Image: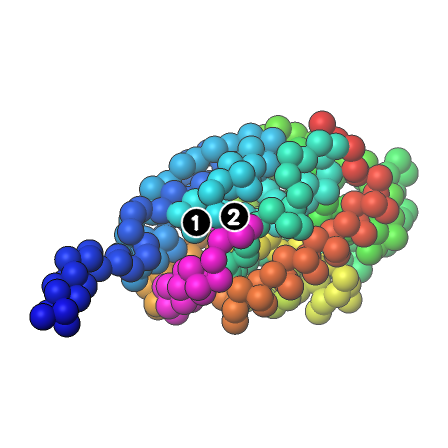
């Protein structure tokens, strides 16, 4: 009789639901329509199918990505609030700005890398150079110094430009703009000779001849432009400015939940259709072997950019 009652009590206890039990919230720290937004929607669509829950997209732009990151940094550590972070929105912004509302190194639980967006170094066709070596000689001889454009103070394009001039050992004048589009307009018009930025928005103009590409600032050649050499092949291996994109949860999120999301992420990135869509958008699939591997990558990337930014005196921007 006692055994029967015990069994009935067990049957009366509701089964514990398997995590996740509700939709995820993906915070993209930029406005809709950009590279971050496109990558986030493509990847989380596949992850949602595997995890059995949708990802609700929340675009929260501002402060170079820090406003959106702050939301995730201060969220409940339950794995339901996720950040689409990147080298520009998370690493460089946090190193450049004087006030950061969270501890970048400890506020997040990295899940995994998704993609790399290679930066390309371009000049206006009137600039008489075809390679980085020729650009170095041209810049050294220029009086006054040549100028380079960026999407704004503290942006990835600004830091990449600083990294380039440090590697070339030359002086250049930085001309910041309020975004990629106005900078690109002035470079194509010949008002500014040099620009370093993500490949995706510049690829059509390179192919049409309105811009001349000198090198890809990434670890390997881009499938989108396979004939364009890398900076390492051009003789400047220290110039590595590919923008990375990855997913991060709030620090303290249980490890088993991080592992489950990482598995769903990597399975999604292995889909040929996902790879095709990302590459068409100018990005390259870059999966991490584990959350721990992504954590190391994040720390190493931050340390590398910190050296560049300190040498250039870029810290303290508002």
Secondary structure found at label 2: strand
Q: Is residue 216 left or right of residue 142?
A: left
Count of labels in the image: 2
**Residues tagged 2 and 1 counted as in contact (Cβ below 8 A):** yes
User: What percent of the width, then of the height, locates residue 253?
Assistant: 49, 53
Q: Give the magenta part as a residue range.
A: 249-270
Q: Residues within 10 Å of mark 1 (few under 14, many from 20)?
A: some
Q: Nearer the viewer, mark 2 or mark 1?
A: 1
> In this view of the protein, which residue sits in the foreground, 284 or 310?
310
Magenta run includes residue 93: no
Q: Residues within 10 Å of mark 2 (few under 14, many from 20)?
A: many
Query: Would residue 115 be seen by someone viewing this image from the given angle?
Result: no
Q: Is residue 48 left or right of residue 140?
A: left
Query: Would residue 242 be seen by someone viewing this image from the given angle?
Result: yes
Where is mark 2, residue-wise? 250
Secondary structure found at label 1: loop
The majority secondary structure of the magenta stretch comes to helix
Q: Does 175 sit above or below residue 9?
A: above
Q: Is residue 8 left or right of residue 262?
A: left
Q: Give the residue displayed 59% in from the left and 42% down from the top.
A: 89
The picture quadrant where one finds residue 261 is bottom left
Q: Give the residue displayed 64% in from the left and 34% down from the top.
A: 101
Q: Give the residue displayed 72% in from the left and 42% down from the top.
A: 95
Specify the quadrant that holds the N terminus: bottom left
User: What percent of the width, then of the height, locates residue 84?
Assistant: 49, 47
Where is mark 1, residue-wise? 78
> In this view of the protein, which residue sits in the foreground, 159 or 60?
60
> In this view of the protein, which residue sits in the foreground, 114 or 200?
114
């Amino acid at each position: 009789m006692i055994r029967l009652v015990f069994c009935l009590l067990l049957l009366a206890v509701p089964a514990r639901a398997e995590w996740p039990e509700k939709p995820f919230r993906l915070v993209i720290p930029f406005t809709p329509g950009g590279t971050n937004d496109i990558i986030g929607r493509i990847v989380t669509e596949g992850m949602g199918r595997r995890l059995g829950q949708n990802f609700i997209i929340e675009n929260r732009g501002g402060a170079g990505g820090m406003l959106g990151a702050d939301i995730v940094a201060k969220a409940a550590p339950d794995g339901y609030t996720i950040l689409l972070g990147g080298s520009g929105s998370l690493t460089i912004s946090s190193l450049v700005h004087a006030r950061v509302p969270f501890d970048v190194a400890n506020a997040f639980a990295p899940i995994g890398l998704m993609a790399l967006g290679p930066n390309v170094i371009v000049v206006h066709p009137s600039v008489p150079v075809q390679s980085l070596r020729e650009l170095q000689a041209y810049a050294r001889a220029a009086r006054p110094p040549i100028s380079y454009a960026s999407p704004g103070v503290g942006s990835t394009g600004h830091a990449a430009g600083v990294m380039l001039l440090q590697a070339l050992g030359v002086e250049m004048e930085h001309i910041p703009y309020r975004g990629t589009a106005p900078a690109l307009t002035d470079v194509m018009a010949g008002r500014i000779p040099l620009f370093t930025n993500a490949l995706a928005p510049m690829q059509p103009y390179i192919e049409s001849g309105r811009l001349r590409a000198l090198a890809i600032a990434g670890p390997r050649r881009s499938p989108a432009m396979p004939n364009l050499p890398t900076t390492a092949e051009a003789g400047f291996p220290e110039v590595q400015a590919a923008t990375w994109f990855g997913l991060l949860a709030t620090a303290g999120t249980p490890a088993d939940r991080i592992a489950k999301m990482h598995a769903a992420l990597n399975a999604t990135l292995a889909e040929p259709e996902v790879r095709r869509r990302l590459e068409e958008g100018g990005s390259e699939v870059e999966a991490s072997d584990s959350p721990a591997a992504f954590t190391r990558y994040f720390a190493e990337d931050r340390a590398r950019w910190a050296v560049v930014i300190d040498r250039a005196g870029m810290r303290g921007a508002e």
